[in-house]
Amino acid sequence: MIAKTIFIKDLKAKDTVLSTFLVRSKELPLNKNGKAYLALNLGDNSGEIDSRLWDNVESVASSFEPGDIIAVGGKVNCYQNRLQLIIQHLTPVPPQEISLDDFLPKGPDNLESLYEELVEVFRGLKDPHIRQVALSLLEDPEIATRYKVCPAAKTIHHAFIGGLLVHSLQLIKLVDAILPLYTNINRDLLIFGAAFHDFGKIYELSYDGSFGYTDEGRLVGHITIGAVLVDRKIQAIPGFPKALEWQLKHLILSHHGELEYGSPKRPHTLEAQILHHLDNMDSKINSIQTFIESQKGASRWTPMHRAYDQCYFRPDVHLLQ
């Protein structure tokens, strides 16, 4: 077993590095002279770093794929106020020689208790039909096992073990925070949407190695998967109200908000509209906070956030110096 001793969070400019990393992405772009170079995004459980290899590119690139673990020797530079690892040599590492815990982004240690907290929320719902279908999902052994560890996304937000669970509980707290400010909102519907809008990701995403997409995820997608899972449980409950069934499915089918963002339907209920905005807010705040916290340069401005195409101001960066 190869022990990992150097983590990305501890890297500084001019450091010499000899360590193992997970390959999160691999590209072979061309430089200004038309020569290919290897552009990698490497990660471990503490963060990620953009990396470059300039020499002997084609033969090296063919020796590994995204999701593999590689041993890297190189030096850390600062490029455009961002750390970059210049690779001098690399070697693929057999998976049996490493512990994946060193490479997958780590979530909370108390995932079991957090899941029980989620279950307790639904045990306390007023609506007996929503309570029944929700508990039939959460107490399904396969769903429970997956839900406890699934990330909420591959990279953008809550991209760590247990991220989906953390995101869902955060949305439930947001629901309860805004309810006193408005009237005629069905809390039980919103709570259901908070917990199950994304839970199709337990089959859409792969997370037993590096984070990625399953074949089912690529072909079907988490929105459809989630709606199908809910439908199966509802059909097993005699006399489940049809109007309620449609509203529960609608929460899942519309939570991306717009057709061009992947929603089969736009939100057509007040609860679905609220869910869309809360989900969008929580995912973006987490993504931006994670991005800002990952920056180690002395600049008060971050580099460009790739997902949102803008940079962010860090007014307290001087406190880190």
Image (spheres, rainbow, N blue to C red):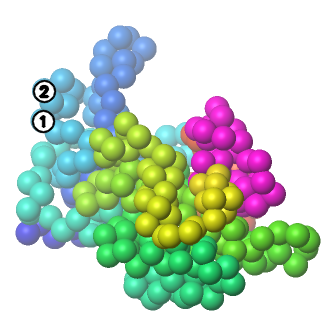
The answer to whether residue 236 is magenta is: no
Position of 85 relative to 10 (above/below)? above
Inspect the magenta stretch and tell me whether residue 257 lies in it: yes
Q: What residue type is labelled 1?
A: Ser
**Would residue 242 be found to the left or right of residue 214 on screen?**
right
Q: Classify 17 as above or below 53.
A: below
Location of residue 127 in the rendering, given as x and y in whole percent from the top left corner: 67, 79
Q: In this view, does 296 lie above or below 67?
A: below
Viewer-proximal residue, 113 or 320?
A: 113
Q: Residues within 10 Å of mark 2 (few under 14, many from 20)?
A: few
Dividing the picture into quadrants, the one containing residue 183 is bottom right
Quarter containing the N terminus? bottom left
Q: Quadrant of the C terminus?
A: bottom right
**Residues shaded magenta:** 252-280
Using the rendered image of the protein, determine whether residue 113 is visible from the camera's viewpoint: yes
* Residue 62 x %, y %: 15, 30
Q: Residue furthest front?
A: 239
Which residue is under mark 1?
63
In the rendered image, residue 218, in percent from the top left (x then y), is placed at 37, 39
Dot 1: element: loop
The residue located at (58%, 67%) in the rendering is: 240
Where 102 sits versus 74, above or below? below
Identified at 69% across, 84% down, the residue is 126
Q: Which amino acid lies under the numbered mark 2 shown in the image of this protein?
A: Ser
Mark linked to residue 59: 2
Q: Helix, strand or loop at disc 2? A: helix
- Discs 2, 1 touching: Cβ within 8 Å: yes
Measure the C-alpha gap from mark 2 to mark 1. Answer: 7 Å
Image depth: mark 2 or mark 1 in front: 1
Q: Is residue 234 left or right of residue 180?
A: left
Residue lying at 45% horizontally and 52% vertically, measured from the top left: 228
